[in-house]
Image: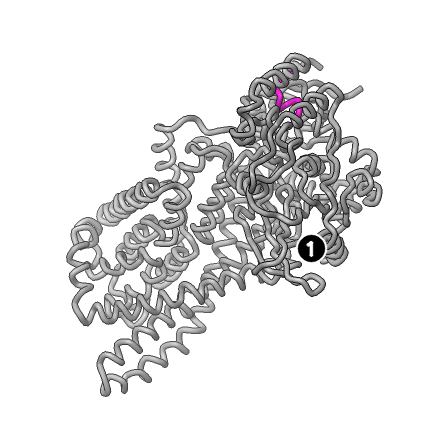
C-alpha cells in the first residue's frame, strides 16, 4: 500500500502513521493525545460529513475523532507485515 | 487554616472527579467526556485524624497545555504550593497515561499514582503488575476503582505515609544518551527557579528545549545561547522539531514501562459499547438516533413537568384566599405576603416541575458518554457555522445552565473558537428559559410550538454564527477523544440533581421571592408602569404585546424564571392559562424571552472570562437578534 492521507485510508485496516504535516498547535495536541509517527492506528469509519474516527493500536487507546481537514494532513501506510 | 494540600492530576476521563467525590463531602461534576471539570474544586478532608485540603484539577493530557482548562492545571502546579500530587491514571489507557506520569516525575513534586479503573482494565485483558510499576517509577502505585470505592482507603494510607515522611523527589527517567547529555548540561547551567516557582531544574531544562514559553524569562535569559545550541543540535540530529523529539522520548519511555509491567491478552469479543458505536456513529442512522434522542428528551420533560405542575396547581391555588384577611390589617403586609407566595408558587409549581426532570436527564446523558458522540455527528454541520464539534459540549451544557457552559468553552484550544462560542451560547435556552417555554406553551399555545421555537432558535444560532464567522479566521480542526460509552450512574445523576436543586433553592428562590415582592410593590407604587412606558416602543410597538410585559422583561435580566411569575402579576391573571395573550402573542413573547440575554450571572461570567467588551457585545447582540426574531414571528402571525 502506498502512502496516503488518513481520510483516504481503508477503514478497519491497520495503518502506521508516517508523517504529520499539520501546524505546530495541532501537532502538539496530537502528540499529547498519544498519536506519534510510527504508531499503528486503525480507521473505524468511512467519513461522510463527519470526522475520521481512529483507535491507536500501539497504545490501545480509546477512540479519537480527527476533523477531516486535519486527517488530510496525516499520512499513513499499511502496517501489516 | 487548611492542612497539607493534595491535588488530583490526570488526563481527562481518568476518574479524578469520581475519586474526589468519594473522598470529599462536596460533589464535583463528574461526566463521561473530556472537560467536565474545567474549574478547580476543593474540599477539606480528614485523613487519619489530620485535616487536608483536597483539590480536583481540570484534566490535562500534557503539561504543555493546549487549552485554557489545561493551563489552569499547569499554572497551579507550577505556581501554587502543593504538598502531594496524586496522579490519577486510567489503567485501560496505561501507556498513554504514563506519558503524563513521566512528565510529572520530571516536575519533581512528591507523587503518588492511583491506578484507577483497574477492574475495567482487567475486563479488557490488561493485567498490570502494580508492584513492578511502583519499583520502576520509584513512587507509590495503588490500584483503585474510584467508581466502586475500591482501593481508595489504601491510596489514602499511602498518601498519609508520603506526607508524614516526605521522600525526596523520585529520579526521572533518562532520555536517549545524546539528548540526556544536553538536558543535564542545561539543567546544571539554568539558574534556580525563583521562590514560589515550582519544578526541578531538570524539568525546566527539558521545557527550555520542548516548550520555551513555559520557562520564566529570568531563568531562560542567562542561558539563551546554550538553549538555542541544544535545540539546534536536536533538530539537526532528528530532523524534527524539538517538541516532537521530546514527545517521542516520553512516548517511548511510557511504552517501555507499559510493556514491562503490563500483560495484554487480547479478547476476541467485541465490546457492547463498540457494537453500539457502530449504530450511534453511523453517518445517517446515528443522526436519526440523535434526533429521536432529542425529541424523546424533550417529550419526557414536557410530560413529567406538566404532570407535576397539574398535581401541584390545586394545592397552591388554595393559599391566596387564606391571605386575603391580611388586607384588612395592612395593605403593605398583604402585598408582601402575596408577593412572597406568588414567588414561591412560581418556583415550586411552575419552574421546579420542569427543572427537576431536565437536570436529572441531563446528568444521565452527560454520564453516559453520548455527548461526545453528538459532538462527532455534528462536527461537519458546526463547521458550516464557523465552529467545530468540540463546542457541542458547551452548547449541550447550555441547555442546563449558561454559566457552566461558558466555563466549558475552556476546553476549546483557540481564542477564536472560544470567542464565537461565547457569543452564541447565550442563545441556547437554559433550564430557566426551558421552564418558561414549557410552562407558557403548555398553558397558551400547545407543546408543538415549543418544538417550533427550539428549531427556530437553532436556525438563529446557525445564521448568527455564520454571519459572525465571516469576519473571523477559519475554525481549527477537531481532535477529540471519545470515551467508551457506559451505563450512567444513577447515584451520580441524583447527586448532580441534588446539587443543582440545592443551588436553585439557595440562590434562585430568594431572588424569585424578592423579585415577586418587588413586582407587587412596584405595581402599587406605579414604578413598573414607568418601566413599561419606557419599553413600550419595543414591547407594544414592535412586538405587539401588552406594554405591561415590559417590566417583566426588564426584571427577567436578573433571572429568567421571574418572567412567568411577574407576567402573571403584571397582567393580573390567577394562572398562566388565564393570561390575556393570544397563542400568537405567547409565541412572540417566548421567542424574545428565549433569545435575549439569559441572566445577570451569565453576564458576570462572560465578563470575567472574555472581558466586559465581549460581555457587552454579547448582551447587545442578543437583544437585537431577539427583537428581530420576535418581530419576524409577529409578521408571520399577521400574514397567516
Q: Residue at x 28, y 67 (%)?
A: B568
Q: Chain of mark 1?
A: B
Residue at label 1?
Answer: B147
Please say if B96 is above or below B619: above
Label tally: 1
Q: Is residue B609 left or right of residue A50?
A: left
Of the pair B136 and B526, the residue shown nearer to us = B136
- The x and y percentages for residue B441 are 36, 59
Q: Alpha-carbon neighbours of circle 1 within 10 Å: few (<14), some, or many (≥20)?
A: some
Q: Give the quadrant of residue B617.
A: top left
Q: Can I make out residue B269 in this image?
A: yes
Q: Can I make out residue B287 in this image?
A: no
Q: Residue at x 55, y 26 (%)?
A: B220
Q: Which residues are magenta?
A: B240-246
Of the pair B436 and B102, the residue shown nearer to us = B102
Q: Residue at x 46, y 29 (%)?
A: B475
Amino acid at each position: 500500500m502506498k502512502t496516503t492521507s488518513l481520510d483516504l485510508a481503508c477503514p478497519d485496516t491497520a495503518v502506521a502513521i508516517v508523517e504529520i504535516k499539520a501546524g505546530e498547535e495541532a501537532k502538539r495536541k496530537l502528540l499529547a493525545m498519544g498519536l506519534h509517527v510510527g504508531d499503528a492506528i486503525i480507521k473505524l469509519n468511512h467519513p461522510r460529513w463527519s470526522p475520521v474516527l481512529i483507535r491507536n493500536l500501539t497504545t490501545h487507546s480509546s477512540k479519537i475523532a480527527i476533523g477531516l481537514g486535519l486527517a488530510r494532513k496525516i499520512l499513513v501506510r499499511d502496517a501489516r507485515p | 487554616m487548611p492542612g497539607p494540600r493534595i491535588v488530583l492530576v490526570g488526563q481527562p476521563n481518568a476518574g479524578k472527579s469520581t475519586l474526589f467525590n468519594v473522598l470529599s463531602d462536596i460533589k464535583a461534576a463528574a461526566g463521561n467526556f473530556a472537560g467536565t471539570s474545567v474549574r478547580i474544586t476543593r474540599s477539606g478532608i480528614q485523613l487519619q485524624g489530620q485535616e487536608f485540603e483536597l483539590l480536583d484539577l481540570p484534566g490535562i493530557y500534557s503539561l504543555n497545555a493546549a487549552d485554557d482548562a489545561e493551563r489552569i492545571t499547569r499554572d497551579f502546579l507550577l505556581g501554587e504550593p502543593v504538598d502531594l500530587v496524586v496522579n490519577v491514571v486510567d489503567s485501560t489507557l496505561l501507556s498513554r497515561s504514563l506519558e503524563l506520569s513521566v512528565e510529572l516525575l520530571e516536575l519533581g513534586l512528591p507523587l503518588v499514582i492511583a491506578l484507577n479503573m483497574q477492574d475495567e482494565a482487567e475486563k479488557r485483558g490488561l493485567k498490570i503488575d502494580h508492584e513492578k510499576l511502583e519499583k520502576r517509577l520509584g513512587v507509590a502505585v495503588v490500584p483503585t476503582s474510584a467508581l466502586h470505592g475500591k482501593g481508595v482507603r489504601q491510596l489514602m494510607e499511602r498518601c498519609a505515609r508520603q506526607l508524614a515522611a516526605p521522600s525526596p523527589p523520585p529520579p526521572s527517567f533518562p532520555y536517549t544518551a545524546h539528548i540526556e547529555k544536553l538536558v543535564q548540561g542545561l539543567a546544571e547551567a539554568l539558574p534556580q527557579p525563583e521562590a514560589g516557582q515550582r519544578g526541578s531544574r531538570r524539568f525546566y531544562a527539558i521545557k527550555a528545549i520542548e516548550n520555551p514559553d513555559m520557562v520564566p524569562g529570568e531563568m531562560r535569559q542567562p542561558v539563551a545561547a546554550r538553549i538555542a545550541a541544544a535545540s539546534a543540535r536536536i533538530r539537526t540530529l532528528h530532523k524534527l522539531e524539538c517538541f516532537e523529539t521530546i514527545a517521542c522520548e516520553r512516548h517511548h519511555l511510557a511504552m517501555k514501562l507499559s510493556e514491562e509491567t503490563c500483560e495484554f491478552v487480547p479478547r476476541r469479543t467485541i465490546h457492547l459499547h463498540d457494537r453500539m458505536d457502530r449504530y450511534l456513529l453511523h453517518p445517517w442512522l446515528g443522526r436519526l438516533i440523535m434526533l429521536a434522542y432529542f425529541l424523546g428528551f424533550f417529550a419526557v420533560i414536557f410530560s413529567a413537568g406538566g404532570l407535576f405542575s397539574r398535581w401541584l396547581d390545586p394545592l397552591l391555588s388554595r393559599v391566596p384566599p387564606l391571605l386575603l384577611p391580611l388586607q384588612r390589617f395592612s395593605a403593605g403586609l398583604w402585598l408582601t405576603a402575596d408577593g412572597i407566595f406568588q414567588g414561591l408558587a412560581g418556583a415550586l409549581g411552575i419552574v421546579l416541575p420542569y427543572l427537576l426532570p431536565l437536570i436529572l436527564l441531563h446528568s444521565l446523558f452527560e454520564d453516559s458518554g453520548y455527548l461526545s458522540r453528538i459532538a462527532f455527528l455534528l462536527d461537519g454541520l458546526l463547521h458550516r457555522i464557523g465552529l467545530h464539534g468540540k463546542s457541542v459540549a458547551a452548547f449541550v451544557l447550555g441547555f442546563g445552565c449558561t454559566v457552566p457552559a461558558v466555563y466549558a468553552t475552556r476546553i476549546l484550544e483557540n481564542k477564536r473558537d472560544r470567542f464565537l462560542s461565547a457569543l452564541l451560547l447565550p442563545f441556547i435556552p437554559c433550564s430557566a428559559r426551558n421552564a418558561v417555554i414549557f410552562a407558557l406553551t403548555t398553558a397558551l399555545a400547545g407543546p408543538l410550538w415549543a418544538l417550533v421555537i427550539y428549531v427556530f432558535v437553532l436556525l438563529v444560532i446557525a445564521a448568527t454564527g455564520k454571519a459572525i464567522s465571516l469576519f473571523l479566521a477559519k475554525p481549527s480542526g477537531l481532535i477529540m477523544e471519545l470515551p467508551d460509552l457506559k451505563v450512567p450512574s444513577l447515584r451520580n445523576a441524583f447527586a448532580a440533581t441534588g446539587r443543582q436543586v440545592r443551588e436553585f433553592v439557595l440562590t434562585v428562590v430568594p431572588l424569585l421571592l424578592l423579585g415577586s415582592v418587588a413586582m407587587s410593590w412596584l405595581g402599587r407604587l406605579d414604578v413598573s408602569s414607568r418601566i413599561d412606558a419606557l419599553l413600550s416602543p419595543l414591547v407594544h410597538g414592535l412586538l405587539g404585546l401588552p406594554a405591561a410585559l415590559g417590566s417583566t422583561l426588564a426584571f427577567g435580566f436578573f433571572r429568567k424564571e421571574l418572567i412567568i411569575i411577574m407576567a402573571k402579576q403584571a397582567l393580573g391573571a390567577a394562572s398562566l392559562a388565564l393570561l390575556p395573550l393570544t397563542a400568537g402573542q405567547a409565541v412572540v413573547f417566548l421567542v424574545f424571552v428565549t433569545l435575549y440575554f439569559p441572566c445577570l450571572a451569565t453576564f458576570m461570567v462572560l465578563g470575567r472570562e472574555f472581558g466586559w467588551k465581549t460581555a457587552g457585545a454579547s448582551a447587545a447582540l442578543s437583544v437585537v437578534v431577539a427583537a428581530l426574531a420576535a418581530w419576524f414571528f409577529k409578521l408571520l402571525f399577521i400574514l397567516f
